[in-house]
Image (cartoon, rainbow, N blue to C red):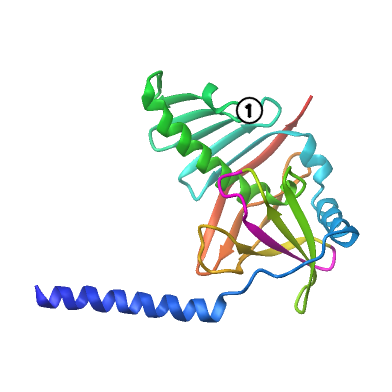
Amino acid sequence: MKRILKRVLYFFIVVLTLGTVLFLIYNEPLPEGEQGPGAEALAEKMLQSLNAVNYNKTRYIEWDFNGIHSYKWDRQRKIADVSWKDRKVVLNLEDYSKSEVYIDGVRIHTEEKEEPIEQAIAYFNNDSFWLVAPYKIYDKGVERRLVKTEEYGDALLVTYTSGGSTPGDSYLWLFDEKGFPVAWKMWVEIIPLGGLKAGWKQWKITETATYLPTGHKLFLFNLKLNNVKAYGEIE
């Protein structure tokens, strides 16, 4: 028993030490930026590089997130099919209470539907953001600021003051010379490390001539967006 306790204690000491070292090395304060014409011009440059006009016309988007959550999103009807394990939620994005829940293919009408709906909302908010975040920089409650960086030049700091599951999160978009996003740095509620960098380089041109990512490099991990499709036109 003493040996087991020593090993557990040693494990926690190593984890704590490693976490402290990573925090001291990689943690960055949220940069200051300037709102105004410069930030808006950079935002528009990014959207033009991604064919955002075509995205805005796209009706259906399908993908799965790391092979564990799958989606079919009807942007015209504002409905998203969210599936995982034995569950499927037909999520009504305008009125969550009107969502439908199926477990093992059987529709649920009781209070048991509340938890799956809450899970589906959280999954959709997170997983769709990793797919379409560039196109959400003009959502309601979003602030945009121009930030000067040594490595990437002009960068765009985007802060979501409302909406989603974690309002207050900020992202610093980094671009190539053409204004195409290659990475961002994150200051988000769920990650204690400020300025953690994630790559946005695995892009796909979809059927609607819209750019969507198929994966991201996040520190030592790869986030995979599989079977990405965008098709149909909003009437």
Q: Which residues are magenta?
A: 164-178
Q: Nearer the viewer, residue 40 or 88?
A: 40
Where residue 22 appears, as percent x and y from the top left, is 49, 77
Location of the N terminus by quadrant is bottom left
Q: Secondary structure at mark 1?
A: loop
Task: Say which quarter of the image contains residue 147.
Answer: bottom right
Q: Nearer the viewer, residue 163 or 123?
A: 163
Q: Is residue 169 magenta?
A: yes
Q: Which residue is mark 1?
A: 94
Please give left or right for residue 227 compared with residue 89 in the image.
right
Q: Label 1: how many residues lie within 10 Å, few (<14), some (14-19) or many (20+)? A: few
Task: Say which quarter of the image contains residue 184.
Answer: bottom right
Q: Amino acid at mark 1?
A: Glu
| Residue at the (56%, 46%) spot, across then down | 127
Q: Nearer the viewer, residue 194 or 127?
A: 194
Principal secondary structure, stretch drawn in magenta = loop
| Residue at the (80%, 45%) spot, across then down | 52
Q: Is residue 187 among what the camera can see?
A: yes
| Residue at the (63%, 43%) spot, across then down | 163
Is residue 166 placed above or below 151 in the rendered structure?
Answer: above
Location of the C terminus by quadrant is top right
Is residue 111 placed above or below 152 in the rendered structure?
Answer: above
Where residue 205 appears, as percent x and y from the top left, is 74, 48
